[in-house]
Amino acid sequence: MKHFLRISLLSLGVFFTPFTPVIAQNVQVHYDFGKFIYDKDMHGRPLITTTVEMFKPDSWGSTFFFVDMDYKSSGVAGAYWEISRELQFWKLPLSLHLEYNGGLNFVRNAYLSGVTYTFNNKGYSFGYTASAMYKYIQQQDFNEPHNFQLTYTWYWHFGQKVFTFSGFADYWREKTLNGNYIFLSEPQIWLHLNQLQGYADDFNLSIGSEMKVCYNFAARQGIYLIPTVAVRWDF
């Protein structure tokens, strides 16, 4: 689901996959413009969101998690996290997928299982994953906990690795007052300063933006487009 009340993720900032030969961690800070664009619907929406992400491959697949927190002047206004595991004991680009989603502010526990197909080109400059999953939503309002979710993620490093375009798209069934199907996507664009002349290689600061695209999401009917400006530090 990768959502939260900013509601994000697995937008890995840079998406990595079970075949990526590196460990990745990053911290992101986003300034959200939803409050200004949709004043009537989102007048109380927090302006700041932080995201902490980690991805680690091993001999049996990979583990990924992220934690989102939203902030108001009074303190933390919401929290959401996801943790997922890709299990792979073979050389085919297919893995078994296990995932948990949960958080505060009416975010219900969700348990997912399914399969993931992964592609990376030879230089790891472009790749994507596609997952098909069964989704159990605990204490679903309409007593329909059995659902499905389709997830697509991608990354593309370009401009001699100065830029990264990455993101995810989720489509899932969940019966709500606004309908039975929800769409959420969060494409991001990043400029990596350590790839520019004059910056040290270990100056791992990136600046960028995210566009949240959602339909019938978070108790709101219809399509919403919510941009952010952001900074990220990779460890």
Image (cartoon, rainbow, N blue to C red):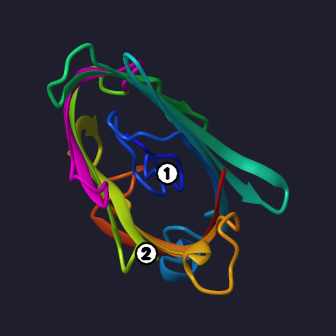
Q: Main secondary structure of the magenta part?
A: strand
Distance from Cα at disc 1 to Cα at disc 2: 23 Å
| Residue 160 vs residue 114, the one in the foreground | 160
Q: How many marks?
A: 2
Quadrant of the rendered structure where residue 234 is? Answer: bottom right
The amino acid sitting under disc 2 is Phe
Q: Which residue is mark 1?
A: 7
Query: Do callouts 1 and 2 mark residues in contact (Cβ within 8 Å)?
Result: no
Query: Does 122 lie within the magenta span?
Result: yes
Q: Which residue is mark 2?
A: 163
| Residue 197 vs residue 40, the one in the foreground | 197
Image quarter in which the N terminus is found: top left
Q: Is residue 159 above or below residue 64?
A: below
Quadrant of the rendered structure where residue 196 is? Answer: bottom right
x then y, percent, for residue 101: 46, 30
The region drawn magenta spans 112-140
Q: Residue at coordinates 41% horizontally, 19% vertically from top-left?
A: 139
Identity of the residue furthest to the top in this view: 89
Q: Earlier in the sequence, mark 1 or mark 2?
A: 1
Q: Residue at coordinates 48% horizontally, 51% vertically from top-left?
A: 8
The amino acid sitting under disc 1 is Ile
x then y, percent, for residue 179: 21, 46
| Residue 55 vs residue 51, the one in the foreground | 55
